[in-house]
Amino acid sequence: MDVLRPTLIRIGGRVYRKNLIQEQAYQREEEEDFCTGPSDCADEPCDAFVVEETEKGFQCRVEVPSPLYKYIIGKKGETKKRLETETRTSISIPKPGVEGEIVITGQHRSGVISARTRIDVLLDSFRKKQPFTHFLSIALNQPAIQEKFLQFKEEVLEKCSKDHGVSSSLFQNPAKLHLTLGTLVLLNEQEIQKACDLLQRCKEDFVDQIAGGKPLTVEVSGVEYMNDDPAMTDVLYAKVHMKDGSDRLQVIADQLVERFVASGLMLKEWDRVKLHATVMNTVFRKDPSAEERNNTMTGKSSFKERESFNGRNILKLFENFYFGEVQLDSVRLSQRFSSDASGYYATSGQLTF
């Protein structure tokens, strides 16, 4: 890490510097320990979060999804013991699997604040390691689009099946054709509800105004590839653009992601959302239910295991393939690895235009 440009972590509207620390490796991730110096964060501002004064001193409550408890406890409870010793606090954690609040108590306000800050930084670090559970999507699985997609698949296999790596297993499930705006890690019902509530606020704050209170008409036309060499393609996608030539869909997508990033529910991956509908993906070769992440740098190991395909002929023959025109009327909070009655992803919440 460049000491002159340390990693910055945004928590609760504040920005913290992530100091370089020595980590001890354990075989299992859930047993990783948290090590920090005794003076870190001790001078944190008192208004970063609510600290209550009690008869015995001070306390602070923090809502933490139960899957993350293990990271605060650490191997054989070592992380929790160290935090308590170095901040002179007591940390009460609910039983595994029971949703609730972690309560930090101590005789000194500064100690409680220090413990809370360290827990926030610790949780932020481990949350980033969790696989995403939900994503903001716009469905493109209308019957007319599905029909044209199946035509595209049939013609590609007819004309390009002899090209290296091209097979029927690469193609997207037509019922799950979609645009991915951004991915989220939502670990309990409270976080899912928070995301649903934010979607509705976005509708009221800017989406209705930009969309004009009616569906957006888009055209799905042409194909493009993700990586540098078309002979070694991993993802082939269909391009999407507004029929009226405006950038309203792009503006809505960018502002939604910006709002979700600011809330802490989503990590910032790109300056702008790349509007694309995946039609072929090498991750489908081994797992037809897999979904790609917007950030192709994430999960490098899985990309190494991929068998790329030669997409040159596909790009040449189908460069302007027309998948059709469609009315977009909602943004959904979709659940990964799921299906509803229509075959699309199960929806936890949605914003309608």
Image (spheres, grey):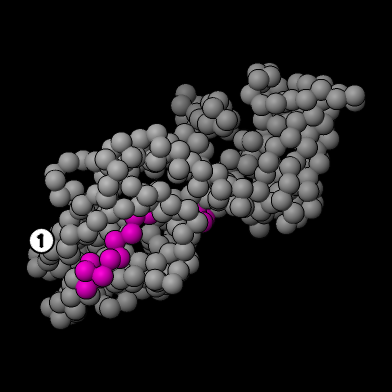
Residue 50: image location, x then y, percent? 70, 26
- Mark 1 lies on a secondary structure that is loop
> Badge 1: few (under 14), some or many (20 or more) residues near its Cα, within 10 Å?
some
For the question of whether residue 122 can be seen, the reply is: yes
* Left or right: 172 as drawn, with respect to 334: left
Q: Position of residue 130 (x, y in %)?
A: 55, 52
Which residue does the image show at 15% across and 59% down from the upper left? 222
Q: Is residue 309 left or right of residue 105?
A: left
Classify 206 as above or below 163: above
**Front residue of 250 and 10:** 250
Left or right of residue 317: residue 182: right
- Is residue 159 magenta-colored? no
Residue 226 position in % (x across, y down):
26, 55
78 or 145, which is in the foreground? 145
The quadrant in which residue 168 appears is: bottom left
Residue 8 place in picture, x, y as percent: 51, 30
Q: Is residue 141 magenta?
A: yes
Q: Which residues are magenta?
A: 131-147
Pointer 1 residue: 320
